Amino acid sequence: MLSRKATCHSHGQDSSYFLGLQEYEKNPYHEVHNPSGIIQMGLAENQLSFDLIESWLSRNSDRTNFIENGRSIFRDLALFQDYHGLPAFKKADENLNLAVNINSQVLAEFVEEIRGNKVRFDPNKLVLTAGATSANETLIFCLAEPGEAFLVPTPYYPGFDRDLKWRTEVEIVPVHCSSLNHFRLTKSALEEAYQQAQKLKLKVKGVLITNPSNPLGTTMTKDELHHLITFAVAKEIHIVSDEIYSGTVFDSPSFVSVIEAAKIKYPKDTTLWSRIHIVYSLSKDLGLPGFRVGMIYSNNEAVISAATKMSSFGLVSSQTQYLLSKILGDRKFTKYYIKENQRRVKKRHEMFVLGLKKAGIRCLKSNAGLFCWVDMRHLLRTSTFDAEMELWKKIVCEVGLNISPGSSCHCSEPGWFRVCFSNMSKETLNLSMQRIKAFVDSINGGRYGQNDARSLCSSRSKKVTCYMGFIIVKICLST
């Protein structure tokens, strides 16, 4: 009695990435109420700069109360909006003087500022969406038919298996990158993936990249972008660049958008420009995933028109638009925020990498993002994905750290893990480093077991049931 979509199993929730999140929800760490619980290191949230935004809000309390020129504008914001957004933000409304639609100049200027004002964004070519998840899916709906394919370099964000495929029924063909060259994108890897799609009789419509990379935490080089653009031109396919972490670049090399790379060689009147599309969100740089504000930017008028119509199924509330337009419109604040947030991310990254180093664990050298691509190959029992899953289960269920195994990111080499560091306090991060060091030390001593798990916790014990795919592992933890 249900639809095919309601009964299908292609959502991707059975990924170890999502299973780890579920295990955390069953037994979340709390410094007082549950000190031996699971520490969340699988969620890429930025909680390092909340105080900066809270300080701005305290200085501008009239904005949070929806007061404009001494009068309440609550009723104006409460009314239904057309999905194009209110025109007041593009052109001052003579009566209300409201800056409501952040789908325009203020958001465009903020995105430009993150990129060092090296590229310009026309507000008329920007579509507001309910987060980057919605933006990516909307673009796939606009660019491909069910059964067609996008190439995606690995390792990639596990959520793409849900976001890009579930409702669109478009396929993902992995572009396998190697640790031998630090997982950099190559011409040969792109071509091999394209040929694989041909063998599978899949029509390739484009390449989707994340730049900076999730989960690598690295920015793409100009050479990589050149390989990508040249490939897309030769195959006459689209490029979707998810640049959600562009404001978290804290070290050299600096961030280069695909738009900046393309304009070096290709004039804007070439057909390539109608096949380049940018995704961005305020979830990571401003740490506001709950606000659900994302965007699509494209020079393709047909894509913008279709995406605008689709956005009616995921509108951002007028109250959210109004508040964020005021925050982003304060250019002095945004300049300070971007610089200070990058400084804090860098400091936390250094703290995390040093903690892992003390435990005998190394990371891929990175310069962006809210996570590290952590090399635990030396901790595997054997160089297999089964051994990777075995290690992951121990780290989640016994050590009490939710991290994401590389296999969930479609990494072709077992033993890599994505570990997040910016969604917790320094004290909690220190505790997580103590737990991982005790775990590694016990492995090196050849004696790791439940007693070692208990040593990381206090005296009260309980049972935790971990659902890892179809395997149920019951382990006694001390709490």
Image (cartoon, rainbow, N blue to C red):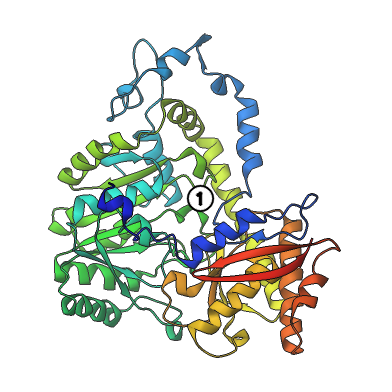
For the image, the number of numbered tags is: 1
Is residue 255 in view from this perspective? yes
Relative to 368, residue 179 above or below: below
Counting from the top left corner in percent of width and height, residue 323 is at: 49, 28
Secondary structure of the residue carrying numbered label 1: loop
Q: Is residue 183 left or right of residue 396?
A: left
User: Residue at position x 19%, y 46% from top?
Assistant: 303
Counting from the top left corner in percent of width and height, residue 246 is at: 45, 55
Q: Please name the amino acid that badge 1 sits on.
A: Lys
**For the view shown, which residue lies furthest in the front direction?**
1
Is residue 422 in view from this perspective? no
Looking at the image, which is closer to me, 448 or 356?
448
Q: Quadrant of residue 177?
A: bottom left
Relative to 334, residue 396 above or below: below
Counting from the top left corner in percent of width and height, residue 301 is at: 16, 43
Per the image, the residue denoted by label 1 is 284
**For the view shown, which residue lies furthest in the right direction?**
459
User: Residue at position x 16%, y 77% from top?
Assistant: 198
User: Residue at position x 74%, y 52% from top?
Assistant: 30
Relative to 237, residue 50 above or below: above
**Which quadrant of the rendered structure holds the C terminus?**
bottom right
User: Residue at position x 41%, y 67% from top?
Assistant: 156
Counting from the top left corner in percent of width and height, residue 167 is at: 28, 52
Q: Quadrant of residue 459?
A: bottom right
Q: Is residue 346 left or right of residue 458?
A: left
* Neighbours of disc 1 within 10 Å: few (<14), some (14-19), many (20+): many
Relative to 405, residue 168 above or below: above
